[in-house]
Structure formats: structure tokens, C-alpha cells
Image (cartoon, rainbow, N blue to C red):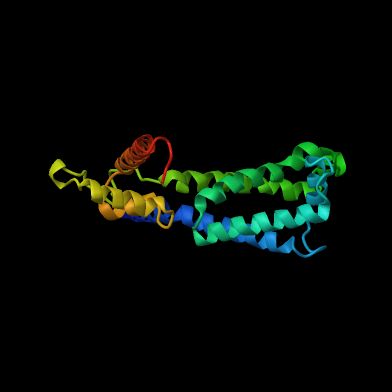
Amino acid sequence: MHSERFVAIEGKLHGVLVRHAISALRVTVGAVFLGFGVLKFFPGVSPAEGLSVRTIDLLTFGVVPGHVGIVVIAMLESFIGICLLANRWMRLAIWLLAIQFVGILAPLVLLTGRLFSGPYHAPTLEGQYVLKDIILVAAGMAIAAGTFRGGRLIRDDPGVPDVPPPPPIRPADEPDASRKLQIVLSAAAGERSVQDVCDEHQIPESTYYAWRTATYHGAMSALDEQTNGNGGDLP
């Protein structure tokens, strides 16, 4: 009896984690990026300023001055942080994270001697600073998997159900073409996630993407017909 209650409580907690873990990770990583980015706007404040300047110098072969590069990094990190905190422009934020991670991990290759110059080649404070950024890389991968293209965590525990999956749409209940277009556009604008739209209309995400693909193909066909009908020139 006590074991069943414990399993039920554990299942409820797991359901909460599945629903909110990625969001919590997104907010905390966003706060870290925004905080570290703002520090870099003020000379001598960020503990990673010297390392960042040297890395920029090596990556750009001295073309980009250090004081310019550090401002660019500050803007990039701050913008990524704002995107993650606001949960907006996530597609752009994910790609910027990929670019940022190259710069984060570059010192491990370009400045290995500087990062591991402690006793018995132990990592210095700068080395430890860079090594802990590996956690940010892993966190960024998890955020990308949980938000990019409608990705999300799901539960697979039939013994403790969480939120039942939406029922499949029967042919008689399938919306007409106009309604499908409205559903596709409601997420395509980027203001709402694919997951939210699919949950609202109780459709699988695979169905949404199938409708979106058909919409794009239909739009391209219509544009081709219009172009060919006008002799190759749009009005």
C-alpha cells in the first residue's frame, strides 16, 4: 500500500518534471547568458574578458580588434539570454547558441597551455571557467531538443498516466482546407509553439507538419502558375 502511494507520488512529480524541466532549464541558461553578457559590456568587470579577447584574436587572425570582439560577444550572449528568457525567436536563438558554443570551447584547443598551466598541469581558474561551460553546451543541446521544431519531453509510463494524448482526428471531424491553413499559420508566425497549437486543436504534431508541408507545396505551385501565366513577370 505504501509502495503504491510512493509510486503514485513519484509519478506525479515526474509528470511535473516532464512538463516544466525544459522550461526551467531554458530560463536558468538564459539568465546565465544575459548576466555574463552584460558583464562584458564593462571593461575589467568580466573575469573571462582577457581569455575572450585572446580567443577572438586567434580565431580572426588579429583582424578583429579585441575591444570590438568583446562587445560583439556581449551583444550575442545578451541577445541569446533575452530570447531564452522570453521564449521568443527560439529558432534564431538555437542557431546562435551553436555559433556561441564554438567560441566557448575554442580555448580548449587554441589555448590549452594557458588553461592547464597549474601544478601537474591542473586547470587554472580560467581553465575551470571554460570546463564548466561544457555544462552549458549540454544544457543548450537539451533546450534545442526540447523546443526546436516542436520537440518536447514525453512520458512512457503506462502505470502512472500523466496527460492523455489527444484523440486522433476522425475523417468526419477533419477541418476543411481553410481551417487547416489557419492552424498552420498560427504556429508558422513564431508567436506560438507547434506544441501549443497542436494541443489546442488536439492534433498530433506529425499531422501539423504534414499540413504545413502541403501548404508550402501548394503556395509554391500557385506562385509558379502565376509566374508562368504572366509570361515570367509578376505584376
Residue projecting furthest to the front: 231
Q: Residue at x 83, y 47 (%)?
A: 54
Q: Residue at x 57, y 45 (%)?
A: 95
Residue 10: where, in percent of width, then height? 37, 53
Left or right of 40 on screen, residue 227: left
Whether residue 151 appears in this view of the structure is: no
Q: Quadrant of residue 42?
A: bottom right
Residue placed most toward the observer, 219 or 104? 219
Q: Foreground: 106 or 93?
A: 93
Is the residue 139 above or below the residue 230 in the image? below
- Image label count: 0
Residue 184 placement, left or right of 113? left
Q: Residue furthest left?
A: 172
> Residue visible at 63% across and 61% down?
34
Residue at the spot 66% in from the left edge and 62% down from the top edge: 35
Rendering coords of residue 12 (x, y %): 35, 55
Give the image location of residue 68, x and y in percent: 79, 55
Q: Is residue 232 left or right of residue 3?
A: right
Q: Judge whether residue 86 can be spotted in this image.
A: yes
Quarter of the figure with residue 76: bottom right
Relative height, residue 23 to residue 235 (above, below): below
Q: Nearer the viewer, residue 173 or 85?
A: 173
